[in-house]
Image (cartoon, rainbow, N blue to C red):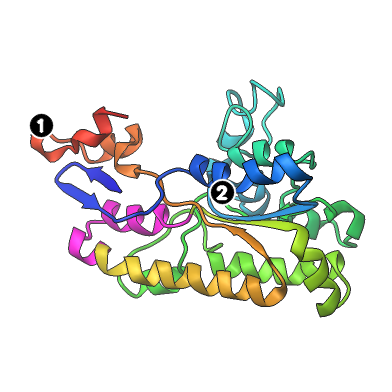
Amino acid sequence: MAQAYPNRVVKFNSAISTLFLFLLLLIIPCRITAECYTSIFALGDSLTDVGNRVILSDDPANDLHMAYPYGETFFHHPTGRCSDGRLIIDFIAEYYGLPYMPPSAGVMMNGGINGSDIEGGVNFAVAGAATVDSAFYEERGINNPNTNCSLRVQMGWLKELLPFFCGSPSECHERLKSSLFVVGPFGSNDYRNGLLQGKDIEEIRSYVPIVIGAISDAINDLIELGAKTIMVPSTSPDGCLASVLTDFESSNKEDYDEDCWNR
């Protein structure tokens, strides 16, 4: 996949570039035969967060997510999603006739957790989350100004809530067979934070196997817990985002990846 940053053209190899291709591979055969999933568990960043960032943070900057135009087109009020309506994860839930997943922070802050509240799954994603813990980047002079709710942290929340979803390891193995796990997309914040704080492309490239390793560890953990179906969306071409193009603006046309203009 080509990702363009002016003066820093990043090219990461990727077998799959969009979440939609995953959906085609996963849901078309299932929909024809029977209902595939009875619950969905999601981890990720702003592309998947349905409210955790707003609930967890006391940063006034997050109040922006709770003001219009956020939420205006579907829910008709802000929900904590980084969108004016639904996210891809919401459309996946709709497709399978499942309720919209509640944000894990809201479930856990209620004190007594009711298993019936999470029958359809839980969303653990947090806007701004990196794949790898903040401590790794802080040692390299990179600060995550948004959150330290990394993939490892989100996996910890999932394991904490799982006993309320299924009472024993054997029951979990059985129930999670019919659950869909969405891990990501992850990676954008790992790379973008470093670039924004002056790190060069070669250093950022060195993080790629570490990010992939963290995702692989999470996948293996989920399999051990009993997961049978795990969707791992690829990172999007962040270098084509208007905000990133603005952050790395250049007067030299050759600094830009032509792929962005063909999207």
Quarter of the image where the C terminus is located = top left
Q: Which residue is mark 2?
A: 59
* Residue 69 percent across, percent down from the top left: 58, 23
Q: Quick one: SS at disc 2?
A: loop
Q: Is residue 192 magenta?
A: yes
Q: Residue at x 78, y 45 (%)?
A: 34
Q: Which residue is mark 1?
A: 251
* Residue 215 percent across, percent down from the top left: 49, 67
Whether residue 161 is situated above or below residue 50 in the rendered picture: below
* Residue 120 percent across, percent down from the top left: 81, 50
On screen, residue 146 versus residue 182, left or right, reads left
Whether residue 109 is situated above or below residue 29 in the rendered picture: below
The magenta region covers 186-204
On screen, residue 33 versus residue 110, left or right, reads left
Q: Residue at x 76, y 48 (%)?
A: 102
Q: Residue at x 27, y 33 (%)?
A: 260
Front-lying residue, 13 or 112: 13
Q: Please say whether residue 114 is visible from this viewpoint.
A: no
Label 2 crowding class (10 Å Cα cut-off): few <14, some 14-19, many 20+? Answer: few
Front-lying residue, 135 or 20: 20
The kind of residue tagged 1 is Ser
On screen, residue 107 versus residue 63, left or right, reads right
The kind of residue tagged 2 is Asp
